[in-house]
Structures are given as C-alpha cells and as structure tokens.
Amino acid sequence: MGALKYSRQRESIIELLRARGDHPTADMIYESVRQIYPNISLGTVYRNLSLLVNIGEITKISTPEGADRFDARTSPHNHFICRKCHNVMDLEMENIDHIMEKAGRRSPGVIDGYTVHFFGICKECTKK
C-alpha cells in the first residue's frame, strides 16, 4: 500500500478517539465528528474507521451483542464488557503474557498475540 493521503476528517476521527476514555461505537464517533464536519456521512466514518483498523492506528472491539467499539489504545491491554449495557472498559491488571506460553504448547501454529475480554455486569448496572 502506498503512502496514505492526508484527510482532515480521518485525523479528526483519530484525535477524537485518543481524547476519549471510553470505547465508542461508529455511530457515537459519527455524532461527535459531525460537530466539526456537519456534512460528513456515516459511510465516510465507517470507511475511515475500517482503514484506521487495517493500518493499526486503532483497534476494533467486537462484542457478542451490540455494535463494534473502537479504541485508540493499540498497546496490549484487556477489556471488561458489561453484559447489560454493553459498555467496554479498559481492565488494568497485572501482565498475563504467560498464557501465550501455555497456549503455544497446544497451538497448531505460532502464536504472536492475544486478546482477552472479561464479561460481567458493570458497577453502574449492578446499582440499577
């Protein structure tokens, strides 16, 4: 792939993601970016999110229920996903890289990474 042409809209999307502490959906990103670029289409947001995922600038978090979420933090980390509100939160915890060695013993190939999602009910939902 050649050099990526600069796009103000794409830059706004990634800046928005970096500034947020949550993991927004494409629709949430669209609503926020529309404040800056009122004529931006939802399709443009989706295409740019897909491109940013493909080039490794952001990550996509697919949840069992609900829409995909996006994260500008690309370094390895874990997530907690609420089964009620579908909110995705970073889960700060000690390093669990030892699971790669354990999985590698049973793997039919070479493991070079992993993703861990923990599921449960978040504090906000348990209060309700």
Image (cartoon, helix red, strand yellow):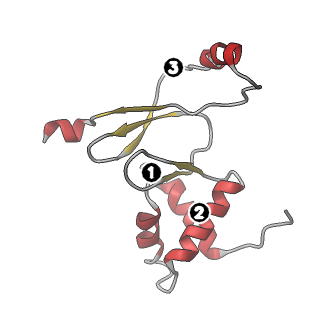
Q: Residue furthest left?
A: 128
- The amino acid pointed to by label 2 is Leu
* Residue of label 3: 94
Q: How crowded is mark 3: few (under 14 residues within 10 Å), some or many (20 or more)?
A: few
Residue 115 position, x and y percent, is 57, 33
- The amino acid pointed to by label 1 is His
Give SS at disc 2.
helix
Q: Name the image quarter holding residue 3.
A: bottom right
Q: Is residue 116 above or below residue 36?
A: above
* Residue of label 1: 23
Q: Considering only order in the chain, which callout, 3 or 1, is on the residue closer to the N terminus? A: 1
Task: Using residue 76 as the reference point, say whether residue 39 is left or right of it.
Answer: left
Task: Using residue 34 as the reference point, say whether residue 86 is left or right of it.
Answer: left
Residue 57 position, x and y percent, is 66, 53
Residue shown at 56% from the left, 20% from the top: 95
* Residue of label 2: 49
Q: Considering only order in the chain, which callout, 2 or 1, is on the residue closer to the N terminus? A: 1
Residue shown at 46% from the left, 29% from the top: 92
Residue 77 is marked as: none
Q: Residue furthest right?
A: 2
